[in-house]
Image (spheres, rainbow, N blue to C red):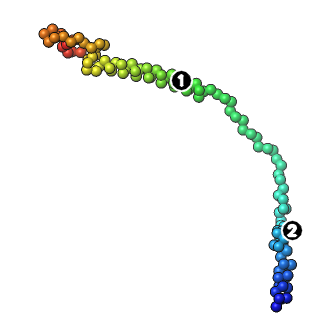
Amino acid sequence: MRSVVSLIFFFIILSAPAFVLGQNPNASNSLEPTRPQKEYGPKKTKKKKAPVTYDARNEFYDRMEKNWDDREKREKDLNAANLMQPPYFGHKRPPKKRPVSKMKYCKICGIRH
């Protein structure tokens, strides 16, 4: 019985040497070679970097200057709006407070003060 099992095991080892030794059994029968042929040809050209331009920087400075001008205009308008607040009524300085008997009609704001 032992001899039969050992013979079967021995025949299995002899029939499949490629699996036991770690070789590829289809290597000799393969249509393709084991190492593919390397094709030589022209190398790919590298892309050239675009020349440095300063357009973006100049546009940035132009925007900053425009924003500066807009900011000054807005501040000027705010100062003009402050003159329209109730204590001034369009005057540069607050109007004089006179007694009721001496009040005068103001041509600028249309109020007696």
Quadrant of the frame with the C terminus: top left
Q: Position of residue 12 (x, y in %)?
A: 83, 80
Q: Position of residue 71 (x, y in %)?
A: 44, 23
Q: Position of residue 79 (x, y in %)?
A: 36, 19
Residue type beneath disc 1: Asp
Front residue of 101/65: it is 101
Question: What residue is shown at x 70% (from left), y 34% (from top)?
Answer: 49
Determine crowd level at label 1: few under 14, some 14-19, many 20+ residues with C-alpha closer than 10 A.
Answer: few
Determine crowd level at label 2: few under 14, some 14-19, many 20+ residues with C-alpha closer than 10 A.
Answer: few
Q: Which mark is residue 50?
A: none
Quarter of the rendering containing residue 87: top left
Q: What is the distance, in whole Å, between disc 1 and disc 2 at their CAs? A: 74 Å
Residue at which label 1 appears: 62
97 on left or right of 62: left
Question: What residue is shown at x 76% (from left), y 43% (from top)?
Answer: 44
Q: Secondary structure at mark 1?
A: helix
In the figure, 22 relative to 77: above or below? below
Residue at which label 2 appears: 28
First of labels 1, 2 by sequence position? 2
Question: What residue is shown at x 76% (from left), y 40% (from top)?
Answer: 45
Report how many numbered discs are placed on residues in the image: 2
Question: What residue is shown at x 83% (from left), y 49% (from top)?
Answer: 40
Front residue of 36/112: it is 112
Residue type beneath disc 2: Ser
Quadrant of the frame with the N terminus: bottom right
Quarter of the rendering containing residue 11: bottom right
92 on left or right of 73: left
